[in-house]
Every structure is written in structure tokens, then in C-alpha cells.
Image (cartoon, rainbow, N blue to C red):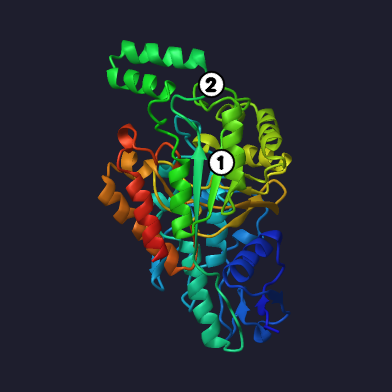
Amino acid sequence: MSVPVKIYCTDPTPRHEYIFSLFFEQLLGSTYVYVESAVNAHLNYSTELSATLSCIPHGLLSETSLRESLQEQIEFKCWGGTHGFFHTGDGAIPFDIFSAAFYLVSRYEEWLPYEADAHDRFPAEASVLTQNNLLDEPLVNQWAIVLERLLLENNPELVLTQPTFSYLSTIDIDQAWKYKNKGFVRNTLGACKDLLNVKWTDVKERLQVLLSSAPDPFETFGWQHALHKKYDVDCHYFVLLGDHGKYDKNSSHTKKAFRKLITELQAIPESNVGVHPSYASNASPERVAIEIARLTDIVGNSPTTSRQHFLMHQMPNTYDALVANGIQVDHTMGYSTHVGFRAGIASPFFWFDFRGNKVSNLCLVPFCAMDITPMHYMGQNEKEAIITLCKLVDKVKAVNGKYVSLWHNDSLSKDGRWRGWRTVYEEVIKYIKT
């Protein structure tokens, strides 16, 4: 039986429990117990002097409310091959890595007032990680590795086991088809718009697809399945089932072809299907239940996973709606405008609800790279994007984390601006698997 990590911590709170569980149970594969003396501990997390490996508390974990002034105390400094903040001493652990990790993974800054972007989202530019050029570093995982080394140097009897590196491909289905199964009215209006904009190539393509003389550009699912099978890749699909609107343009959930596609994806052994709550659902949370019911009707069981369309997310309303509808795992944690680690971590973690000052049962799976980011927001070509994404893979591998990518079925097509970009997807997967 392995020895639990013994922690001396005066007056532990739910915040302590949350972050100790993240470090010792989830990231270091062990257990932990509290002891009544620093002398008998493996880790002294208190202000008391001791020869034991010590980390002086910043105080954040003992608080019960939010403080806007806390952001003024964040100053990053180099340490142990990584960067830390909340400097509290000059010992082996000069930063309170537990409070710092709590600040990042709880998304503390997203609970505070901020200037939202055009879609009313928390912008990457407002993040302390972006402002300090550290968004592309999985800091919390790095801190866990340094902590592991220090603990084992001082306590060789401990057995700490980090998780192994893993990869998950996630694909959003915002529009299963570009032309097919859209209905007469939508195709007619689309054709008229193309004519008015003198897009003769699109007019011709639409007619060819609708007359079954050419495949629909967005119908890339057969290619995806063959690639995933070739490289033994697990894939998670998120399907948009909201009513048609300005930002919600998928086929109707009543279309037989659409329902057939979803059931076929669900039947693939290495894939799973979750709900993709619509853009409109953010203003009307009751729509989440309707869209989940639609997916349940199609696949025969209620989905437990989700990702917000347009990554629409507001703390805590978005998570409240998901939890209320039985969602257990959410994949929204990331940015469309920047690659990197929104919560400073490359591993799944649980949502902390500040209103009750307690951990929830909702697991958050962060992604670190979205298809549109290198191409549109970073202005990169295919070769440059492959380098950018493979560097992220290396950083996640270095900390035994979980690399999660976000693509769309249309971004894996040969259509328009995406021509050639499926090569990026395949080359990164090939890099991961070799």
C-alpha cells in the first residue's frame, strides 16, 4: 500500500481540499492526509518554521470571497525551469504554488468584472497569462512536476505516479453540410445571395451538389473516420442542434439524413457524441434542455458531455445551465483567438463554484488549440501552423498532460480558405503518434 502524502496545514478549507486533490490525486497519482505537526509531515503548508519541505501560504485558500485587488499582487518570476507567482518566501518552494494554481484553474479572473469581447466572452487579452506571455505554458502541470521532485528528494518512501500523456481529438459539427439537407428555402436564398455577390463558382458548386454530381464540401466524416482508425485516435463530436439563427446554421434536427449521420458517428467505437449548445442558448438557458432532448431522441440516451458553440461562456451562468441538465463534462475551456492553456493547465479538472465556496461535480476538459487560431488569428500558413501546434504537443508531453485539439468538419474539407488545412490536422496527429 502506497504512503499518502502527509500535509501539515492549519485550518484547511474547501479551497485547500480542492487544490490538494488536484495536485496529489489527479496530477501526482497519490493520496494525502493531514497531520497535526510539521515535524511529521512530508509538506509543511503553514507559516510555522520547520525542517520539513515548506510552502508558505499566501492566504488565498483561507478566504471565502473574491478580491479584485488580488490581481495587483500577481508578479511572475522564474523558478525551477518554470514561472511562479504569489512569492511568499525564499526556500525550496518560494511561491505559494497552491494558491497560484487555485487562482488559475478556478478561473478567478473570470468571476471578476472584465470588458467582454464582441460576443460577450472573457477575452484572452484580459488574462494574466496572456499579459505575461505565459498562455502557452501548462504552468500548473509544471509546478506539480517540481513539487514531485522535491517531495521525492526529501521522502524516498513516497510513491507518486503522474498520468501518462494522452490525446483527444474533438470536432464540432456546426454545419454538417454546406448545401445538402438545408431545405429548399435556405438553398434558394443562398443561391440568390451568391448571384448578387457574383460568386459564380459557388453557384455552380451548389447546383452540382444538389444534383448529386459532386460531393458536399463539408461532408468529411468518411475521411475523418479512416484517419482516426489509421492512427488509433479517439474522437469526440459536438453537434449543434439549435434552431436556425444568425450564428446557428446547422441542418434541422428533424432531417432524416442528419439524424442518420449522428447515429452513425455515435456507433463508431472510437468516437462519442455530445451536445453543442447553440449561440442562442446563452440568452435563453432553457434552450439547452431542448437541444439535449433532441440529441437524446436521436441517439437513445442523454448526453453527458458538451461544448458551447462559439465558445460562448459566462461564469457561472453557463455551467449552471449545463449542470442543471445533467452535463458532467464540458470542453469549452480554451480560446478561439489564442492557442495555449486558458486555465494554465493541460489536464482535466473540476469547476469550483465560488458562490458556495465548493468544488462541483462538473469536469472541465481544456483544449489548447483550435483550427481557426493559427490560420486566421495568427496569420499562419499550413507549414507554420504545424510547427506551432507540434510545439504545443511537446509542452503537453513534457508534463504528461492531455492534448486536446478542436477542429470542425468544414475545416477538414478542401473548401475555400480551408483548402490544404486537413494536412495540418493529419501531420499533427502523425507527430503525436510517432
Q: Which mark is residue 245?
A: 2
- Residue 198 image offset from top left, x and y in percent: 28, 14
Q: On residue 250, which mark appears?
A: none
Q: Where residue 184 appears, x then y in whole percent?
A: 50, 14
Give 150 or 39, whichever is nearer the viewer.
Answer: 150
Q: Secondary structure at mark 1?
A: strand
Q: Quadrant of residue 408?
A: top left
For label 1, count other residues whose C-alpha is less than 10 Å away and answer few (under 14), some (14-19) or many (20+): many
The residue beneath circle 1 is 238
Q: Amino acid at mark 1?
A: Phe
Q: Position of residue 94 (x, y in %)?
A: 48, 72
Front tag of 2 and 1: 1
Query: Can residue 74 be seen here?
Result: no
Q: Nearer the viewer, residue 152 or 372?
A: 372
Residue farthest to the bottom, as pictured: 156
- Residue type beneath disc 2: Gly
Quarter residue 123 falls in:
top left
**What is the x, y in percent for residue 180?**
47, 25
Q: Is residue 332 left or right of residue 12?
A: left
> Which numbered disc, 2 or 1, marks the residue that appears first in the sequence?
1
Number of numbered discs:
2
Q: Residue at x 55, y 70 (%)?
A: 163
Residue at 55% x, 44% y: name it. Answer: 237
Quadrant location of the C terminus? bottom left
- Distance of mark 2 from mark 1, alpha carbons? 18 Å
